Image (cartoon, rainbow, N blue to C red):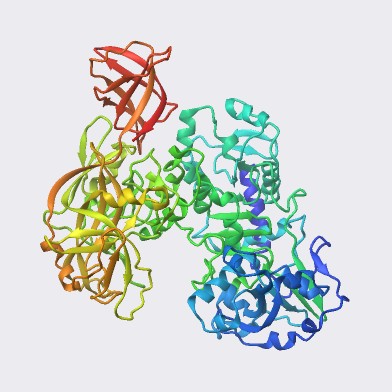
Amino acid sequence: MEHHTMQSRKRRFDELDNYAPPENETTTPTNESSSTFPANEQLCSRCAAIDFDKISRVKIRNELGVSYGDLGLIDMLKSSQCALCRLFSLSTPPQTAADDAIPRHARRVYLRAFSSNRAYARFSPQQLSTHSDTILLGLVKVPPSDANNGSNSAIERMSSSLRETGYLCISDSANQSSLLSVRLLDRDFFDMDIATQWWNYCYTNHTTTCGKTDTNLIKSLKVIDCESRMIVDAPLECAFAALSYVWGRPVPEEASAEAGGMGSRKTLPALPKTIEDSIHVTKCLSLRYLWVDKYCIDQSDSEDKHRQIRQMDLVYSLAQITIVAAAGEDSRYGLPGVNGTPRIRQHALDIGNRRIVQTMPHANWSLLQSRWASRGWTYQEGILSRRRLIFTPHQVFYECSSMHCAESLMLPLEKMHTERRNKFKAHVPPGSFEAKLPGSNPWDIMRYLAEYYQRELSYPEDTLNAMRGVYHAFEKGSLKVYSFSGVPILPPFLQGNGSSKPTQIERSARESFLGGLFWYHLEGGIRRKQFPSWSWSGWQSGKLANHFFNPLYLLRSRVNGPLVWVEESGGEIRSFPEFSDLPGYLSTIDHYARFIHIEAWTITCSITHITLQPTRKRESINDPTGYYVKVPINDTTAGFAKLHLSVDITNYQWVDLLKKQYLGILFPSLSLHRFSPNHRDITFQSPHAYVLLVEDKGEHYERVGCFHMYGCLNDNYWSTDVILSSDAGGNARDMVDADVLRQWFETAPKVKRKIRLGQLASIYIKSSTALDLRASYTLLLPCYTNSGATHQRGLISRHIFWVPNTNDQVTNLRLLHQLHSEVLIGAEVENLTLSAEILGISYF
């Protein structure tokens, strides 16, 4: 049966083997659910004077477009009796916080013409020779005087608002060679034949990037049989669709069903509309099987749930297609355009032989506005899928590993592909996903982590689990990226330039792990105390940078360089191995270990706030005013380095921040002086260091931020004789010359220390047997490794406290390990085994 299904699909694909959207396809709607203003409506004198013939012939070569005048006040457009004014008002950029400072009587909007080629394809003039560029109208709030000067800020402001509003496409029924045609959408109905055509093109041409893979690799896979509505074991070589959606808060009857899990039940219960709609879509795509986590993973079986979570990367990457429900707050909303779930209305206006129609918002904007895009688990589901059918409130998008399509836009797919038709040309702008091939470039891993960092999780303990599939993808890459507790361990290679290949260099796994500690915040966050502060997973909120603070290729082997060890739950200290032994090491080590030990040179420093007043006119790209680390160079001189705080200063008493003393852990490096394209001519100049700033917490240290010590505040941006004025330090003074600062490595007082970096935890347990406060105890602690969950002995401190006024035997045990609240642990006291249930965990 399965083989027959795939053969049937292949026959359908063969019939459409050379499919590309017809360039002269009609834009007539299938019904009147799209809004088309009556053609005989009177236009106002200003709109009647717009010469659309002239606009359609203009040549636009850049993203700035061409100004076509001031349309006046936004409120006047909305209240106008003119059909075109009202259409303009429906495409006006929305109100923003910056607009609040502008009086309502001064809020104006401006009309500009843009190139569809620059917006969607970016063909060269030679490539565009067989098509005429379709002109788009855009409504912007940027005045022509600002827009025409070509500043980056003006371009960004216009681009950002147009991604949200979309454009107004001027289509001419007499022009059969237009680059772009816009399809009028049915508000209530998505034509699944369009999806079939997209998938057909992918299936036929993208065999290397999106082709079939072995679904038998997924162990114990269960799927929904859409014909019988039963949950079944997946047949061999199962071709299935997967659903990525937001569960939302269950209604009472759903909550009771979830509590018991599917268990041994085979027949589906009553389903939320999103699931029902997904079954309908799956069948329309000529597939029989659908995978939905809530029903295909037994939520009541913790072992099976853990096992399935570890292979979710396989589920989504091996699914034939992933249905992305990027609309609504929960699973009851449904898929827009399917079985009556309405979509946001598209508007159009006929003027003579021309139609002006909304293109609708950009795919990436539509996706990012959804609840789906805010949830942590859905990130890897979208990223790992090879084909995606994305249902948004406006329209449906298709995106595979090689191309992306929008329901409303008809573009020449053939022309946008390379000669081999296996992927879009590099110049084509991205669609919903700007990064969607994890593992293809090891140096991109922080880009994925930064995107994921913005997502939300119902349970903080899931932070690493919900990203495990992406990590697996990087481990499978040609240049493998491993990780420990979320910290990336990059391979010992220099990134290639252009067409040159990466070149292997001398760098140990220890150095790569230490370099991976230099993730950093663009905006400070707050602690996620279920994870250690030295991992990005130990933080939430704020904004994580999409690259490492230090250029990792500069971390070179050095005499007396930093050393690192991992402290496991049982107190065992393990050093980092060589790269050849790294996979085996990571398969056995506890990935929830809370402490690492770093032996390195350190400096004592403090934090201050500095306001810069340059004495020579030289502008910096970045605002130099902010928090700095003050580093003593000698008894009379100090250097200042711009600090990247991990801590959100709005949630921290900044006065306390400035009063404390901190420790800087030095990671010496060499400055790259010359770097030839073939990597054969590499020389280095003076030493410098990247520094982790940590705070002493008594029994351990915690991360505060990081900074770079190398002639900070020097002539990279500012003159060497700038004036520093600190609201915490008193009088203004001249900065020392940059050449003096460059000698900090030799002159600054340093002490070699062994730092225990991490976080302590307290655990409350309920024991069936009284515990002797004078005794020392040993617990069997859950240890999560790449090989699965095991147990190891964990030593408990003698600090044991009774909790008063309780009937149960409860102890507060200071542990150095993270535990999950549902885990049962055992304790051994003088050969007596006790049962102990965890009641709660607190961190400090």
Foreground: 370 or 607?
607
Residue 647 horizontal side relative to residue 146, left or right: left
Residue 666 in the image: x percent, y percent? 20, 55
Q: Which residue extends farthest right? A: 40
Residue 806 in the image: x percent, y percent? 42, 14
Establish if 124 lies above or below 518: below
Residue 310 in the image: x percent, y percent? 44, 39
Measuring 75% from the left and 53% from the top, which residue is drawn there? 342
Foreground: 449 or 101?
101
Residue 33 in the image: x percent, y percent? 81, 60
Measuring 21% from the left and 54% from the top, which residue is drawn there? 605
Establish if 242 lies above or below 437: above
Quarter of the image with the N terminus is top right
Measuring 39% from the left and 38% from the top, which residue is drawn there? 530
Establish if 709 lies above or below 159: above
Q: How many marks?
A: 0
Q: Is residue 795 visible?
A: yes
Q: Which residue extends farthest front? A: 731
Q: Quadrant of residue 442?
A: bottom left
Foreground: 67 or 379?
67
Q: Is residue 491 visible?
A: no
Quarter of the image with the C terminus is top left
Q: Quadrant of residue 818?
A: top left
Establish if 721 lies above or below 485: below
